[in-house]
Amino acid sequence: MNCVQRLIKRQPETLRILAASGQLGYGIPEHSFNAGLARHPDFIGCDMGSIDPGPYYLGAGVMATSDAMTRRDLRLVIRAARQHDIPLIIGTAGTAGASAHLEATIDMVRSIALEDKLSFKLAVIRADIEAKAVIDALAAGHLAPLGGRLDVTAQDIEQCTHIAGQMGCDPFVAAFDKDPDIIIAGRACDTAIFAALPKVIGFDMANVMHMAKIIECTSICCEPGGRDAMLATLDKTGFVLESMNPDRSATPLSVAAHSLYEQSDPLTFTEPDGSLDVSHATYTAVDERRTKVNGATWTPARKTTIKVEASAPIGFRSVLLCATADPRFIENLRDLLGIVEKTTRGLVPGDYQIFPRLYGLDGISPVSPVEPMYHPREIFILVEVIAPSEALGLSVTKTFKQFLLHQGFAGRMSTGGNIAFPFTPPELSTGQAYKFVLYHVMQTDDAAALFPVSVEQL
């Protein structure tokens, strides 16, 4: 019997859960992680990804983290789990959790096992969804955008390079039946990584889900917030949170405030498994650094729904990076951008898009052209070009740069030098660009079939 089934069979009345990383691959602070191991956790959980980095990583099938740091973090948690003979659960492998990300992660795990002479049983949960399944759900009216408006057609879905479904607890529970030592899952709800084992053992799901919602981000819920390992101690009466960095404190206020993180509603949270309501939760200081939480309520889902995520290529992106501190140039800038775009389109034929962003003026919060012009002391200009080829994009960006540099305007005191460049070349190609196509909730009658489990002995 391996460590997952041993833990389930033991049925502990108190469960210690160590969250090692809010997103594995960016560097686990080793001192606080080791402090967590010294507290004898029952299992280690790691979130390894998110949709937050945008559509590129999902579309391109690559990791947002560096190979070196990802391998370093994986080695750290794998060694720890095997040395302490406790389960390790990793979700959303390789940033976005699609097949390409999962395979890259598993390859690293295999090489680490070989190099470090480690032996363990690995369970892998896949999260890729066939386009046909999503198209069928669309046709049946079982596909709805998750907030906002994101219209989608069957043709749009077929253009997606990867489609990932976000699993809840049940696929992890299915993996437990395989009796692994380590579980690595594709796209997963952050909560499921930490909630599935306590659920199977029999802890109250309200406390389990509330704990999982907070601990998946490690020490962000502390004062001051950080990314150090976090320990949750779960029992029948609730759970206690403690950062493994002594400089961080999980206070009632900081823990309760975490409900605002990534949520439009700070009181209710919907997961594939059900809904959590923290309206009547209580947060009580155990001491200066620890807080006990209980009182949330849990309503199991009547029908299983999963979030589906996908992106599709839209062309190649090039960017121009420059800045200006010339007050007359800034005053005329909106008109100048229009003039330069018209000139560029007259010189460079093709189907492309130009998106100027003026940081310090309206780069983050765009204002309409009819609003009063604000004149800051200096601004940063980012001009994005999306084109069907890298060569065309760079041609557009370079031409735009040259005419912006020399375009005349009322009150100009110099025929050149009205913009400055942080480095050369100021025109850069970032490669293939992607856009989100699916950010939807899909109803399903057979969620288990969407997330197959396989095992291998390393």
Image: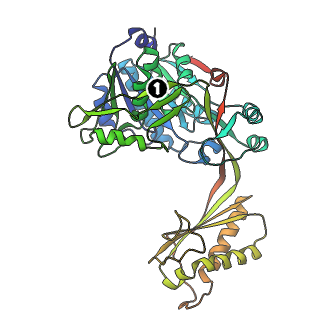
Does residue 328 show up? yes
Depth check, front residue: 329 or 72: 329
From the viewer's perspective, is residue 152 above or below residue 121? below
Q: Position of residue 414 (x, y in %)?
A: 54, 90
Q: Is residue 304 above or below residue 243?
A: above
Q: Residue at x 29, y 34 (%)?
A: 244
- Indicate the secondary structure of the residue bearing disc 1: strand
Three-letter amino acid code at the position of disc 1: Trp
364 lies above or below 446 = below
Q: In x, y percent, where is residue 354?
A: 67, 66
Is 149 located above or below residue 115 in the figure?
Answer: below
Q: Quadrant of residue 301?
A: top right
Q: Quadrant of residue 220?
A: top left
Q: Position of residue 126 (x, y in %)?
A: 61, 27
Q: Residue at x 65, y 48 (%)?
A: 149
Q: How many discs mark residues in the rendered view? A: 1
Judge whether residue 458 can be spotted in this image: no
Report which residue position mark 1 lands on: 298
119 and 51: which is toward the camera: 51
Q: Nearer the viewer, residue 182 or 153?
A: 153
Work out whether residue 244 or residue 139 is closer to the camera in this orientation and state it: 139
Q: Position of residue 71 (x, y in %)?
A: 47, 36
Residue at screen point 26% across, 33% down: 284
* Mark 1 crowdedness (10 Å alpha carbons): few <14, some 14-19, many ≥20: many
Furthest residue in direction left, as rendered: 287
